Image (cartoon, helix red, strand yellow):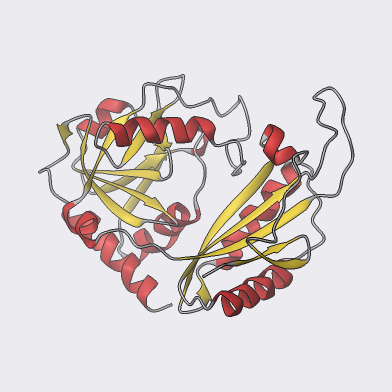
Amino acid sequence: MELTFYYNGELLRSSELHISAFEQAFLYGEGIFESIQVRNRKLLMPESHFSSFFKGAETLGITLNVNEKILEKSIETLLDLNSINDAMVRLIATKGESSGYFYEKIRSYPSLLIMTLPLKRFSEKLYYMGVSLKTSSWRDISSSSFYHDIRTLNMMSKRVCYSEAVDAGCFDALMVNIEGYVTQCSGSNIFIIKENTLITPDHSCGVFPGVTREHILNEVARELNIDTYEGFILLNNIYDSDECFITSTEAGVLPVISCDGKKIGTGRPGVITKQIQEKFFNWYRNQ
């Protein structure tokens, strides 16, 4: 089935969608994106995702002539046209077209692309058995080097690290910044549990504040009466943790059972991780 997309106010099939070779996102990666899950035609945590999307656009100076209601209505229309109930929505905003020359700044109209893709689910085995990580040979950028709290389209560094981990037989790459502190994974946030406390890297390390990350910290942990701490985590803290898991919009909550070939805890998903996982999935199923 040929999918329909929203592009700059028009509804276009994939065969009709043409993006200019002068698009700044194509030439320089100048743009932002946000991913949102849809379950039973309902957007999950739309307010948080829309807030993140518009924050990123404002930070990069992309002025969009749309609001949350327009985005939500456009997504609903695409779900109808594509006959999808469970979807992964991707919002992409760019600075529009340029002249093609680097040293020439042109004020152009921003571009907005919305796609609704059929939701691909991970194997249930990963949630029950857990996944492995590999520390990337590359270093994550410092929080003071660039915007770390928005999702830019320039994801090459993360994709390279991810590919390196997959080639090594792991699910994702663990990132460490140039100061030596753990930040996140290439496509997810990371949590460890030590002595019944839920710990995750602090924003100041260069962490992207993922929507699922915030939900686990502010909602799930509070409901389960689990102490939380955001701080500076070293690689050895990952190895020595009692439990570990990663979170993302796409994957939800995935237990981590090893990192760099070193077993974490018992080498199986831990008790607290399972409690958090169950609480999150119960919320997810009831949406």
Residue furthest to the front: 15
42 relative to 17, above or below: below
Residue occupying the point 73% across, 56% down: 112
Residue occupying the point 40% across, 21% down: 180
138 relative to 110, above or below: above
Residue occupying the point 46% across, 79% down: 40
- Give residue 80's quadrant in the image: bottom right
Q: Position of residue 207 (x, y in %)?
A: 49, 38
**Residue 218 in sight in this render:** yes
Residue furthest to the left: 266
**Residue 205 in sight in this render:** no
Q: Position of residue 170 (x, y in %)?
A: 26, 38
Q: Position of residue 93 (x, y in %)?
A: 70, 51
Q: What count of labels does the image hold?
A: 0
- Give residue 90's quadrant in the image: bottom right
Horizontal side, residue 231 vs residue 59: left or right: left
Quarter that holds the C terminus = bottom left
104 relative to 17, above or below: above
Q: Which of 223 and 183 lies nearest the eye of the viewer?
A: 183
Q: Which of 30 and 191 lies nearest the eye of the viewer?
A: 30
136 relative to 271, above or below: above
Q: Position of residue 275 (x, y in %)?
A: 24, 62
